[in-house]
Amino acid sequence: MPAPDQSSISDRQPSDQPAGESDPRVLRIATRESPLALWQAQHVAQLLAKHTIAPRIVPMVSSGDVDMRPIDGKRSVGVFTKRIQQALLDDEGDVAVHSMKDLPTEAHPRLRMVASPARETVADCLVSPRGLELDALPNAARIGTGSRRRAAQLLKLRPDLDVQPIRGNVQTRLQKMRDGEYDAIVLAAAGIERLEMHDLPRVELPLECMLPAPGQGALAIEVRGDDADAVAVVSQINVPRSTACTLAERTLLSQLHGGCLAPIAALGTVSDVSAGEEPHSVLHLVARVLSLDGKVCLESEADTMLDVASDDWQSTANALGRQVAEMLIDQGAKPLIEAGR
């Protein structure tokens, strides 16, 4: 699987703007219609409205939104993104907004990911009716998560837990917990914050305990590769430092051929370092591959200097992702990944 290729707000709300063919053009943002996906699309619309006429939101229903069976190896990659990508190919929309962690690492030949705005928090949260810490959950507590990465890291810390699959949007998962199907569930902190669920009883899981999925907390913005106008406008909301981090993470995932199912976790960060009179930035990448039961956990990390003003910063991020992937492969990651399919 090849590494991924990176390349004033109107008074009216973007979703109220009429479609039109006038110049400048009104971009149509295709998105899933879950509350979180709509929030993300509205956020991107507001960013784009600083550079062009406020876009119009075009909600779509993906197969992942209506099929509540557990996601497995036969129906995993792209289950939330294919419908949105098809909307661009069919000229139902001009811009696709995805959660980065849901977007396959293998680029579509006719589409181009041109932007990723500033990244939100990457942490995961343990949500329970009383907001208990992980150590305070009762023995054999039922934990709901649709992620094997989360499940494996939970079991590494608490082998006694009864980790069970869960599907549905954030609101559906919370209701299942409140109905007693689960003692707790694990949700991304970014989604909780974006939906302004400030009173939700939860505890943030430390990164040393729960490393995020590649791309977690970030958005991926796609357009048609031959749509020069959309490329020019949308690329203006890209944040290179954030993109460098997710590019390294997704390159690692691609090199490991992990898809979205295998228990692989990764986090890229950029820090500024002052060395003598020449301050510079450092891109750091840490990653884990786990067995499904959490009993085996491989971890590797590395860093590299990064200059986002240069012409080759994307190559630098790609190289770091490949380096850490090879370190994990040398430790024996491939059998763990195969077992997780």
Image (cartoon, rainbow, N blue to C red):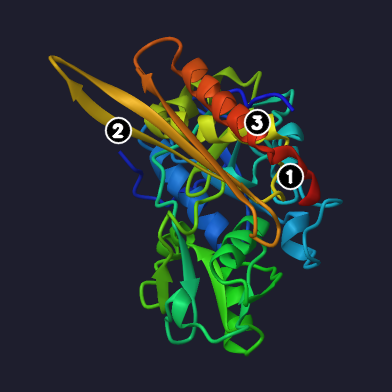
**199, above or below 178, in the image:** above
Q: Position of residue 13 (x, y in %)?
A: 43, 52
| Nearer-the-camera pick, 289 or 30 | 289
Mark with earlier residue (3, 2): 2
Mark with earlier residue (1, 3): 3
Image quadrant where one finds the N terminus: top right
Q: Secondary structure at mark 2?
A: strand
Number of numbered discs overlaid on the protein picture = 3
Name the residue beneath numbered marker 3. 330
For label 3, the crowd category at 10 Å Cα-Cα, with few meaning under 14, some 14 to 19 and many 20 or more, is: few
CB atoms of marks 2 and 1 within 8 Å: no
Kind of residue sitting beneath label 1: Ile
Name the residue beneath numbered marker 2. 271
CB atoms of marks 1 and 3 within 8 Å: no
| Nearer-the-camera pick, 125 or 179 | 125
CB atoms of marks 3 and 2 within 8 Å: no
Residue at x-position 72% and y-position 56%: 61
**226, above or below 240, in the image:** above
Q: CA distance from mark 2 to mark 1?
A: 30 Å
Left or right of residue 152, residue 54 in this image: left
Q: CA distance from mark 3 to mark 2?
A: 27 Å
The answer to whether residue 251 shows anywhere in this view is no
Q: Residue furthest bottom?
A: 180
Q: Secondary structure at mark 3?
A: helix
Q: Residue furthest top?
A: 311
Between circles 2 and 1, the one closer to the viewer is 1
Mark with earlier residue (2, 1): 2
Kind of residue sitting beneath label 3: Asp
| Nearer-the-camera pick, 103 or 332 | 332
